């Protein structure tokens, strides 16, 4: 358990650094801003309690906020998906329930389960984030396009991480 | 009472969620205000140090452009030296200068973090309180304007970029003297909008836009950019003017923080006039 904890702490730091030092500086035509740091929320163990997931989401967003001078915008978006994630997972649960050690990954659940799961949370996070950033609906099409394009790139990066770095963990 | 407690207990996850979201919105609202010294932005020591370390690495890739910029600026400054001027008059006068007093001083700083792709952009610079940087000081680059200081820590400061939702800088058309305010529509980081120029002014593309000196932050006459295009919406009394910035906000790396030594005096006086009105 403690080694698992350490692993998640390490991944928290790594994803935040990648986000603020590399992905925040990616500026593709002013429209595409990927936020792959939310991968941390996607891959938390399924058995984790709802309150701990919420807290992880909140502090993850807050850390990125501190580095991007965005107040609490990231935290608002990550807290929302951290709240919604267990609801989605519960609704999708197989008849016999989940294994205790289950982690939402492509290796364990297959790509046809993972893509809708990740896409829903990514789009939710990006839409909330970009709307909060613009703080009005007048530029709606501009904001919407930004959210869609950025979500696409974030998905590509997350699936890439899944295939490259996630080892078989099923016991 | 018991029922209320039971209700809260049954939905405790939702209430924790609500509480965290409220905290987020409080942070967002607070972040929009000037002058609230806060640790939760990139002018704090930890974030500043990480960005400084990162800048130490990426700076090497930008050295060539930085060198070019500085060389250009050196050349401009050198041409202003009295040694590079030809004295027209045949007699020399030594003037003991008690007429002009120092009005502005400049603190050079390095940009350690910058963004241009968001709706509201900020820069972080590696100078702070200890080097004399204060909130609401203007920030210039060698080419033009950059923004206004928001928060300062001991050794770092965050700067509201001209590319910010709430940025509004007093500017004038160089030859006509008409004053407008400079805002940004969030699209092209190279182009800002000049508002409030009345439609009877004769405009031409390429006209220079400079700071007006009306605010106590920016010295007058600093070049901002050139008029790229202009139009009048039907029934509108004012032009919509697109201005090409002289400063390349994507590549800005060496900046100067302007300390207006008489700024406080001017602001105090203007505040007095405002309170007298009310």
Image (spheres, coloured by chain):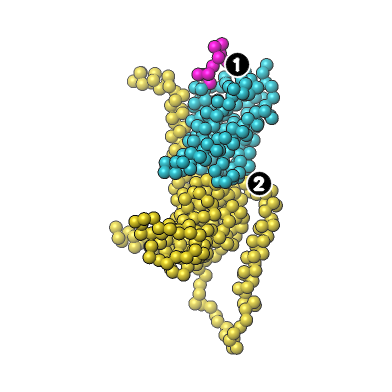
Chain colours: A cyan, B yellow
Kind of element beneath mark 2: helix
Q: Residue A119 in the image: state x and y as whole percent.
A: 55, 29
Residue depicted at x 46% and y 43%: A134
Q: Is residue B55 left or right of residue A90?
A: right
Protein chain holding label 2 = B
Residue depicted at x 56% and y 63%: B106
Image: magenta residue range: A89-99
Image quarter (top left, top right, bottom left or bottom right) of the C terminus of chain A: top right
Number of other residues with Cα within 10 Å of mark 2, as a class: few under 14, some 14 to 19, many 20 or more = some
Judging by the rendered image, the residue that carries numbered circle 2 is B54
Image quarter (top left, top right, bottom left or bottom right) of the N terminus of chain A: top right
Farthest-out residue, top: A96
Q: Nearer the viewer, residue B19 or B86?
A: B86
Asked if residue B155 lies in the magenta stretch, the reply is no
Number of other residues with Cα within 10 Å of mark 1, as a class: few under 14, some 14 to 19, many 20 or more = few
Q: Residue A127 in the image: state x and y as whole percent.
A: 49, 36
Protein chain holding label 1 = A
Judging by the rendered image, the residue that carries numbered circle 1 is A100
Farthest-out residue, front: B234
Q: Report the Cα–Cα distance between label 2 and label 1.
A: 40 Å
Q: Residue B81 in the image: state x and y as whole percent.
A: 62, 74
Instruction: Evaluate whether label 2 is on the same chain as label 1.
Output: no
Kind of element beneath mark 1: loop
Farthest-out residue, bottom: B90
């Amino acid at each position: 358990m403690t080694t698992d904890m350490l692993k998640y702490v390490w991944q928290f730091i790594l994803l935040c650094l990648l986000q603020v030092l590399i992905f925040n500086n990616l500026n593709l035509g002013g429209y595409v801003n990927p936020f792959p740091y939310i991968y941390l929320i996607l891959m938390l163990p399924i058995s984790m309690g709802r309150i701990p997931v919420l807290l992880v989401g909140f502090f993850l967003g807050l850390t990125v906020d501190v580095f991007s001078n965005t107040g609490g915008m990231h935290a608002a978006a990550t807290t929302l998906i951290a709240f919604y994630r267990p609801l989605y997972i519960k609704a999708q649960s197989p008849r016999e329930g989940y294994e205790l050690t289950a982690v939402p990954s492509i290796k364990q659940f297959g790509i046809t389960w993972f893509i809708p799961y990740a896409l829903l949370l990514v789009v939710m996070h990006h839409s909330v984030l970009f709307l909060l950033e613009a703080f009005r609906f007048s530029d709606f099409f501009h904001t919407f396009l930004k959210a869609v394009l950025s979500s696409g790139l974030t998905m590509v990066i997350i699936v890439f991480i899944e295939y490259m770095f996630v080892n078989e963990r099923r016991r | 009472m018991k029922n209320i407690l039971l209700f809260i207990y049954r939905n405790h996850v939702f209430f924790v969620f609500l509480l965290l979201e409220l905290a987020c919105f409080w942070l967002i609202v607070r972040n929009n205000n000037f002058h609230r010294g806060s640790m939760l932005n990139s002018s704090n020591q930890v974030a500043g140090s990480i960005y400084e370390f990162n800048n130490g690495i990426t700076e090497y890739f930008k050295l060539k452009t930085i060198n070019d910029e500085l060389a250009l600026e050196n050349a401009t400054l050198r041409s202003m030296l009295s040694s590079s001027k030809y004295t027209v008059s045949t007699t020399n006068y030594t003037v003991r200068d008690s007429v002009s007093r120092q009005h502005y001083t400049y603190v050079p700083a390095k940009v350690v973090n910058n963004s241009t792709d968001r709706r509201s952009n900020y820069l972080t610079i590696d100078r702070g309180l200890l080097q004399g940087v204060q909130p609401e000081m203007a920030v210039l680059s060698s080419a033009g304007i950059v923004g206004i200081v928001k928060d300062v820590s001991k050794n770092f400061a965050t700067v509201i970029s001209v590319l910010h939702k709430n940025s509004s800088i007093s500017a004038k058309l160089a030859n006509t003297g008409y004053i407008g305010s400079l805002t940004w529509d969030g699209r092209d980081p190279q182009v800002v909008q000049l508002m409030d120029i009345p439609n009877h002014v004769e405009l031409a593309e390429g006209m220079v836009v400079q700071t007006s000196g009306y605010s106590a932050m920016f010295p007058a006459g600093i070049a901002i950019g050139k008029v790229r295009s202009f139009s009048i919406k039907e029934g509108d009394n004012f032009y919509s003017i697109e201005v090409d910035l002289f400063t390349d906000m994507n590549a800005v790396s060496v900046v100067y923080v302007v300390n207006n030594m008489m700024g406080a005096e001017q602001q105090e006086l203007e505040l007095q006039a405002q309170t007298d009105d009310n």
